[in-house]
Image (cartoon, grey):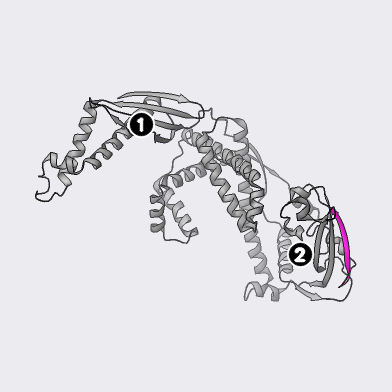
Amino acid sequence: MNITVEKKPECMATVNVEVPADKVASERQNIVSAYTKQAKIPGFRPGKAPVKVIEKRFDKQIKEELYSKLINLGCEDAIKQEDLKVISVNVTDEPKLSDGGELSFAADIILAPEFEVPEYLGIDIEAPSDEVTDAEVDNSLTDLQQRFAEFNDVERELADGDFAVVDFTATTDGKPVADAIGKSAGFLEGREDHWTKIEDDSFMPGFGSGLKGLKKGDKKELTLTMNDEFPLSDVRGAEIVFDVTVKEVKEQVLPELDDDFAGKLLPEKGMDELKNVIREQLGEEKKKSVADAKVNQVVEILNERVDFEIPAALLEQEAQGNAINMIERAKQQGMTEEMIAEQENEISESAEKQAKLNLKTNFILQEIAIKENIEVNDQDVIQRIAGMAQQANKPVKKYIKELQKANAIQNVRNSVLIGKTIDFVVEKANVKEITTPETTENDAE
């Protein structure tokens, strides 16, 4: 075959292939022979139909199969000849068959980026201990207490730890917040029957604590300045005036932490068993949190140590997928179409940034896998698919068929490879155990 490869910017290349006439004729003859043996033609015994009848009857299918096979062979030869690392191949135009019998075609190829693999053995990272302290178990018990608390109506002033049920409206510069900023303001548009705890950091700084001392039926005007972390960027630094009416005063009554309380959560069990269950759950959560922290640090360091161009087409595709997922999550969290549209630029920028990080990380880890001979066997893939099927609540065989139909089995294999490789790099890292502020406080106690 006559093959030329023209490499282009942004990890692209164009391959031009010319297949000699004798190769075209030979491959066509093989395909026609296969049709002759298998085709069922009325009036002829199987395998006995004349070649010309077969060629006429299956002309379109023979042509499609011939072109497909020669294109695949041509691209394979081009990849081997130029030692290309190919992500995808797209034949741009219909192949051309010359009067002399030669077949020619062109294909656009997306190439994996070329770069020097950064040093990945012995990376220095930090992580807290995954051991569960008694204080953490006690904190979880306190959270359970609060979750099962009762709230009694009381006729007195609001005090620290109480809950107020309020109606409120919010304005800035004398206008409703939504009118002032020209778009939806979410909860700053006001609420009815809103519960807020009387403490400094409840709802927003200064709101809950500002109601202390009020009684049922009291009204108060609170003027608060929105800080730089406030979710709605349009009002950061602005003064918001809240007109608040207290409708109810609630006193929180916590249940006793005793065996009766434990029995409500674990029938026929006591506090010791409840504490053991909490410790086990916290242990699993901390192990995952620590493992994630190690992975995040390794990924960040690997990305800092090398830079290279990401295929533009691949980056665009990944970013679009990220944006779709981000929008779906926003809808599930209650954001309206209008609110999402207002954040379109932020979503696009975030989606592209995450896409670049994901793709760059994958390319680095794939190269490390090659250098370290890390491989994925069929059992690894089946095990991963079984887990995915269980999560999707579908039978494994049905789920496999769905993946095959979507040509997604290779994606699963690649995901397993990436996971095994990052585990390898983390295992080889130098991990320094650090003391968290929470641990320091607990130790001091």
Which segment did they paint magenta?
212-226
Residue 102 picture location, percent across and down? 26, 26
Residue 297 picture location, percent across and down? 63, 40
Q: Amino acid at mark 2?
A: Arg
* Alpha carbons under labels 1 and 2: distance apart: 64 Å
Q: Amino acid at mark 1?
A: Cys
Which quarter of the rendering shows the C terminus? bottom right
Left/right placement of residue 97 relative to residue 320 reads: left
Left/right placement of residue 270 relative to residue 379 reads: right
Identify the residue shown where x is 80% and y is 62%.
169
Task: Based on the picture, tell me whether residue 76 belongs to the magenta stretch.
Answer: no
> Around disc 2, counting alpha carbons within 10 Å, would you say few (fewer than 14), some (14 to 19), or many (20 or more)?
some
- Residue 51 figure quarter: top left
Residue 75, disc: 1
- Residue 188 figure quarter: bottom right
- Residue 103 figure quarter: top left
Residue 191, disc: 2
> Around disc 1, counting alpha carbons within 10 Å, would you say few (fewer than 14), some (14 to 19), or many (20 or more)?
many
Identify the residue shown where x is 82% and y is 47%.
237
Which quarter of the rendering shows the N terminus? top left
Q: Of label 1 and label 2, which has the lower sequence position?
A: 1
SS assignment at label 2: strand
Task: Please name whichever residue, 83 or 237, is drawn nearer the observer in this view of the structure.
Answer: 237
Task: Please name whichever residue, 101 or 415, is drawn nearer the observer in this view of the structure.
Answer: 101
Task: Please name whichever residue, 293 or 107, is drawn nearer the observer in this view of the structure.
Answer: 107
Which tag is nearer the camera, tag 1 or tag 2? 2
In the figure, 187 relative to 148: above or below?
Answer: above
Residue 325 picture location, percent across and down? 56, 50
Identify the residue shown where x is 23% and y is 28%.
23
